[in-house]
Amino acid sequence: EADIYQTPRYLVIGTGKKITLECSQTMGHDKMYWYQQDPGMELHLIHYSYGVNSTEKGDLSSESTVSRIRTEHFPLTLESARPSHTSQYLCASSGSGGLGYNEQFFGPGTRLTVL
Amino acid sequence: KNQVEQSPQSLIILEGKNCTLQCNYTVSPFSNLRWYKQDTGRGPVSLTIMTFSENTKSNGRYTATLDADTKQSSLHITASQLSDSASYICVVIDRGSTLGRLYFGRGTQLTVWP
């Protein structure tokens, strides 16, 4: 079944640890995105990718980095987690066209808490 | 500045009742407007997508309206169910750039009580 997956769903980690949030999609989409969302606030785009070996920074500055080595996989990495990184991270994908012209499908999200 | 404002911020209704959520935007030039439903702890799921020329679009008990002249949209939920409890997010897409940027509202938190 075509879907978009994120792991882990919840992560509690100490300050200074390196973490990688996984995102995979079986939708056959070329474009993928990472959003950050705090409770009661709007989604903010932090990274996006048009395809393999393509990554761009989004509207919200983030200390995280991303990679796109395979079409279906778009992991996000924090080299040294801090309490300010505590948030919900949502991954999304979309088909052909510009960044927003085609519908974006979202994963279930990862709730990150840095102590 | 391109913005999307939603009201009310939160809403509580009884099961079986109707409700209407509002979205005002200043995004220009406008491409299309989408309403998403986001359950707690989950990613948003698309309910409706409306282009400039569309005034009304329905998806089951959900009906979205769009007035591109006044830059307003509404989402009407009929005969609410407990499962309708969620955040409803208005998203406006900008066609001014080649990227088609998405602008998100903060959402309306709807709670349906039995």
Image (spheres, coloured by chain):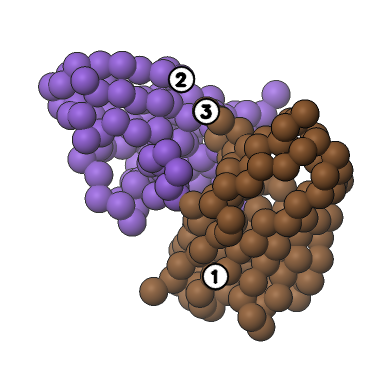
Chain colours: A purple, B brown
What secondary structure is found at the residue carrying circle 2? loop
Residue located 54% across and 70% down the image: B25
**Residue in the foreground of this view, choosing between A107 and A41:** A41
Query: Percent from the top left, x then y, of residue B35?
Result: 65, 53
Q: Residue A3's spot in the image, x, y percent?
A: 62, 29
Residue denoted by label 2:
A9
Tell me if I can see residue A49 in this picture: no
Q: Residue B25 — which label?
A: 1
Name the element at disc 3: loop
Both marks 1 and 3 on one chain: yes
Q: Choose mark 3 or mark 2, whichever is in front.
A: 3
Eyeballing the image, is B85 above or below B57?
A: above
Q: Which residue is mark 3?
A: B41
In the displayed structure image, the side of residue A62 where residue B112 appears, left or right: right
Give the letter of the chain under mark 2: A
Q: Are marks 1 and 2 on the same chain?
A: no
